Image (cartoon, helix red, strand yellow):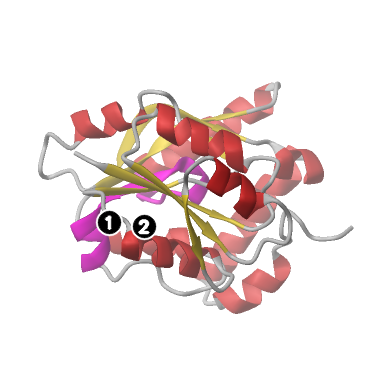
Amino acid sequence: MNVSVVIPCVNEQAHIESAIDSARLAGAAEVLVADGGSCDETEHLARAQAAVVVRSEPGRARQMNAAAKIATGDVLLFLHADCRLPPNAVAQIARAFDNPRHVWGAFRQRIEAAGWIYRVIESGNAERIRWRRLAYGDQAIFVRRNAFCEVGCFDPVPLMEDVLLSRKLSRLARPLLLAGPVQVSARRWVQCGPLRQTLRNWWLVTLFRCGVSPERLARMYRRHDAAE
């Protein structure tokens, strides 16, 4: 089983090398960096790491679709640039996919910060996959290529692409929750405060479920590289 790791990014020079390294150490057959118009050293660093760089119009969903289109793996794994895979990530997926009924899933997380509140967030995110069949992008969603194509890839929206993909894939099969853990940068929680950031995420998802468009929600969601 070949796994293609797709890393969407914009201005991620501080994290892209470690993300690529983790994908290779995890057993990825190829690593594709889907760049949405970085103006820093992200693209240069990715090429130096021998990753396949795919330029795309900005928007995480569009970037990931562009890279997935040329990926060669039987399985696609979508890794945020500020996350790192465990060394046995591909082995975990391979064991799970020995069962042909298993189609997609994500990993448990380890947020890179000390404190009980982060452990609660990790546990809550795991339970969300178990009970709501909803995986977020920072949990490193993986999916069989044929299933990804069957559901129409990511919807080309500026936000909530992971929620929409989870909904579509859940019609095919229940998601797997693998042990991982995926190491996740705590930068957003540190910037906003863990409780405030978690409540903000819940509020955005609630608004989306109530019919607020991804375009409107995107205007409420601050990019990691936004100016102060």
Q: Quadrant of residue 129?
A: top left
User: Is disc 2 placed on a helix, strand or loop?
Assistant: helix
Residues at discs 2 and 1 in contact (Cβ within 8 Å): yes
Q: Residue furthest left?
A: 100
Residue shown at the point (35%, 24%) measured from the top left = 88
Q: Which residue is mark 1?
A: 170
Q: Which mark is residue 35?
A: none
For the record, the magenta segment spans: 131-150
Which quadrant is home to the N terminus?
A: top left
Q: Which kind of residue does numbered mark 1 sit on?
A: Ser
Residue 5 place in picture, x, y as percent: 39, 46
Residue shown at the point (26%, 53%) measured from the top left = 72
User: Is disc 1 placed on a helix, strand or loop?
Assistant: helix
Residue shown at the point (56%, 69%) measured from the top left = 59
Relative to 195, does residue 156 appear above or below in the rendering? below
> Image check: 1 left or right of 5?
left
Residue shown at the point (43%, 37%) measured from the top left = 127
Relative to 132, does residue 55 appear above or below in the rendering? below
Relative to 144, does residue 194 appear above or below in the rendering? above
Which quadrant is home to the C terminus?
A: bottom right
Q: Which residue is mark 2?
A: 166
Front residue of 179 and 183: 183
Q: Could you classify mark 2 by the number of other residues whose Cα lies within 10 Å: few (under 14), some (14-19), or many (20 or more)?
A: many
Residue 180 place in picture, x, y as percent: 41, 27
